[in-house]
């Protein structure tokens, strides 16, 4: 256990020591938040107005609802994309030969693999938590409708997606042996993942074929959880302003707070279990890859 904690501390220290990578990871969520607010906020407000069909709501509820969508989308994307950046330590160790040096020491490969996984998860969650704090401050300024339980659930959702992103990036990074490779993969993931998990545009508005494809991706269910917990309070507040339960349900459907698989509603617990199962499966694949590499070395 002491060796594992030392390896985790070593990997985290290497990440934070590289100021360029650290600050780019830290600034990226803030830049995305600014871009969402500046360019997409009006789109979501207009979409909400279209669903309400002329019904008037206080500005704080509208802003709190739009802000909840923005924050849930931001965290859903960053939890996975930042994990690829944080996993540069594993790739860098292969490039510099540090990995071979570590295997010479009396440290098992399974412990090295676990140390890379946990350190990546810790770094990614730390950056995402800072993004959460920035988002909470933004929501407090424009319209706060999060209960204490909703705040806890958003943090739990973030942790779950971080574990998913870490497991996914760990598998991909096992096959990368150059800095250019991890940079290219990070760029591809950053550009495409938001569309594939339903973070940038509501799944309800996509083409039917694309909706079916997205429905089978685990990250989608994590995004749905974040949407539900970030926007649920604002939607409930609409009820106090005279918006009927029917319209509230239509809003949940239109903005992915509700999710349907083959026209069957998927509960929040089911979404949570899907992402948790994906984490377990991907982590298992990562362990098998490490074990296979060990056999080859032997």
Image (cartoon, helix red, strand yellow):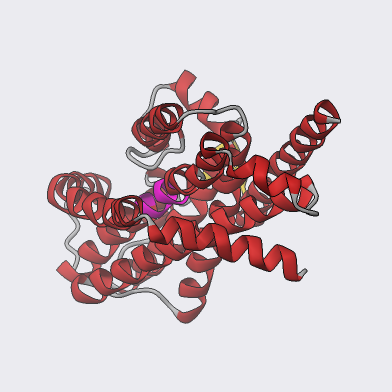
**254 sits left or right of 125 in the view:** left
- Residue at the image position 50 percent from the left and 67 percent from the top: 155
Question: Could one spot residue 245 in this view of the protein?
Answer: no
How many labels, in total?
Answer: 0
Residue 256 magenta-drawn? no
Q: Main secondary structure of the magenta part?
A: helix
- Depth check, front residue: 154 or 50: 154
Q: Is 253 placed above or below 10 here? A: above
- Residue at the image position 23 percent from the left and 48 percent from the top: 44
Residue 20: x and y, percent?
A: 29, 51
Q: Is 10 placed above or below 286 here? A: below
Which picture quadrant has residue 136?
A: bottom left
- Depth check, front residue: 215 or 98: 98
Quarter holding the C terminus is top right
Q: Is 152 placed above or below 263 here? A: below
- Residue at the image position 31 percent from the left and 63 percent from the top: 243
Residue 190: x and y, percent?
A: 37, 36
- Depth check, front residue: 187 or 274: 187
Residue 78 magenta-drawn? yes
The residue segment tinted magenta is 73-79
Residue 234: x and y, percent?
A: 34, 67
Question: Could one spot residue 44 in this view of the protein?
Answer: yes
Q: Residue furthest top?
A: 209
- Depth check, front residue: 216 or 49: 216
**269 sits left or right of 93 in the view:** right
**60 sits left or right of 228 in the view:** left
- Residue at the image position 37 percent from the left and 39 percent from the top: 202
Residue 133: x and y, percent?
A: 35, 71
């Amino acid at each position: 256990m002491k060796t594992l904690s030392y390896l985790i501390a070593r990997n985290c220290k290497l990440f934070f020591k590289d100021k360029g990578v650290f600050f780019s990871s830290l600034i990226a969520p803030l830049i995305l938040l600014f871009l969402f607010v500046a360019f997409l906020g009006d789109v979501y407000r207009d979409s909400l107005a279209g669903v309400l069909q002329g019904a008037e709501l206080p500005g704080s509820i509208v802003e709190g609802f739009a802000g909840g969508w923005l924050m849930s989308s931001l965290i859903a994307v960053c939890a996975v994309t930042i994990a690829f950046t944080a996993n540069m330590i594993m790739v860098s160790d292969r490039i510099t030969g540090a990995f071979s040096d570590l295997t010479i020491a009396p440290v098992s490969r399974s412990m090295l693999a676990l140390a890379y996984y946990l350190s990546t998860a810790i770094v990614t969650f730390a950056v995402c938590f800072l993004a959460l704090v920035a988002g909470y401050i933004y929501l407090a300024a424009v319209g706060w409708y999060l209960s204490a339980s909703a705040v806890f659930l958003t943090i739990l959702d973030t942790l779950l997606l971080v574990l998913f992103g870490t497991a996914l990036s760990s598998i991909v990074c096992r096959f990368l042996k150059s800095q250019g490779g991890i940079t290219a993969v990070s760029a591809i993931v950053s550009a495409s993942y938001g569309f594939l998990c339903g973070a940038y545009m509501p799944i309800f508005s996509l083409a039917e074929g694309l909706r079916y494809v997205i429905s089978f991706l685990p990250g989608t269910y994590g995004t749905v959880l974040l949407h539900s917990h970030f926007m649920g309070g604002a939607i409930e507040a609409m009820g106090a302003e005279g918006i009927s339960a029917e319209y509230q349900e239509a809003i949940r459907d239109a903005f992915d707070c509700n999710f349907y698989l083959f026209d069957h509603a998927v509960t929040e617990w089911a979404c949570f279990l899907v992402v948790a199962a994906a984490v377990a499966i991907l982590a298992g694949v990562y362990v098998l890859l490490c074990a296979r590499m060990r056999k080859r070395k032997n």
